[in-house]
Amino acid sequence: LFSPSPVRSGSFGAKSTPRRTRTCCPTSPGNSDQAMAELSTIARPYAEAAFAAAVEAGSLDSWLEILDRLAVVASDPSVQASVSDPRLPVSGQVELFASFAPGADAGVRNFIEALADNARLTALPEIAGQFRDLKAAREESADAVVVSAFPLDEADLGRLVGSLEKRFGRKIKPQVSVDNALIGGVTVRVGDEVIDASVRGQLAAMDTALRN
């Protein structure tokens, strides 16, 4: 990994030695929690370096917009296949991703190069999420991904947000979606913390307890 500090908007440290692999955080069935933790660890120095560069450049909003866009690109199966193809050189990967950030400053391109050099382009969704969390912390707020079994009315959402703000000690910005598979209740993700208050989660916990 490149050294995340000191970081300047035009540089992300010396380039790495030739890459030995193009894979990022392999997963195996039943190991999703461990894989997510590993991905979070891998993404953290890149997110922190990008955040430092964005702060120095005074362009947090534009960096976040670009990272969100690149995260969508990195999640595309066809792009993932291209990145995994040994016939596509690092320079080609850089050009591919840079084409989705036209007009970006040199710091963004250097960042893309650092990710490509270290086979971390597929970690962009997690990097973007951590960057968002760092930006929110700087602004003393946090995004909460709320998934509810049923639509929440304004009063219910207000009570939930109030409870979350009391728990986390900061302003909460909810992003709400509905998933009937939860059966009842809600799940909430704030940063790396997940609160599962769904009926499905309770049943899963009960099943685990009974099996043990």
Image: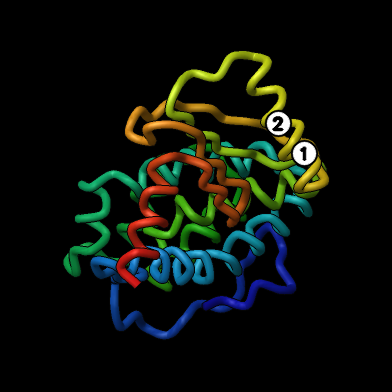
Name the spot of residue 15 as percent of width and height, x first: 50, 77
Say which element carries label 2: helix
Neighbourhood count class around disc 1 (C-alpha, 10 Å): few under 14, some 14–19, many 20 upward: some
Q: Position of residue 198 (x, y in %)?
A: 47, 40
Question: Where is residue 212 shown, x and y percent of the image?
Answer: 35, 72
Mark 1 sits on what residue? 165
The colour scheme used to paint the residues is rainbow
**Residue at 61% of width from left, 74% of height from top?**
13
Q: Position of residue 117 (x, y in %)?
A: 42, 71
Number of other residues with Cα within 10 Å of mark 2, as a class: few under 14, some 14 to 19, many 20 or more: some
Instruction: Determine which residue is flagged by label 2.
Output: 161
Residue 42 vs residue 11, the one in the foreground = 42
**Kind of residue at badge 2:** Val
Location of residue 184 (image quadrant): top left
The answer to whether residue 30 is above or below residue 204 is below
Placement of 50 over or under 79, stated as above or below: below
Question: Quick one: 141 or 149, which is closer to the camera?
Answer: 149
Say left or right for 140 vs 127.
right
Are the residues flagged by discs 1 and 2 in contact, CB closer than 8 Å?
Answer: yes
Please name whichever residue, 114 or 193, is drawn nearer the observer in this view of the structure. Answer: 193
Residue at position x 79%, y 36% from top? 171
- Image vertical order of residue 138 relative to residue 34, above or below: above
Secondary structure category for the residue under label 1: helix
Which residue is depicted at the point 82% across and 46% down? Answer: 169
Residue 10 shown left or right of residue 102 in the figure: right
Nearest the eye: 120 or 146: 146
Indicate the quadrant where residue 28 lies.
bottom left
Name the amino acid, label 1: Glu
What residue lies at 50% left-to-right and 70% top-to-bottom? 42
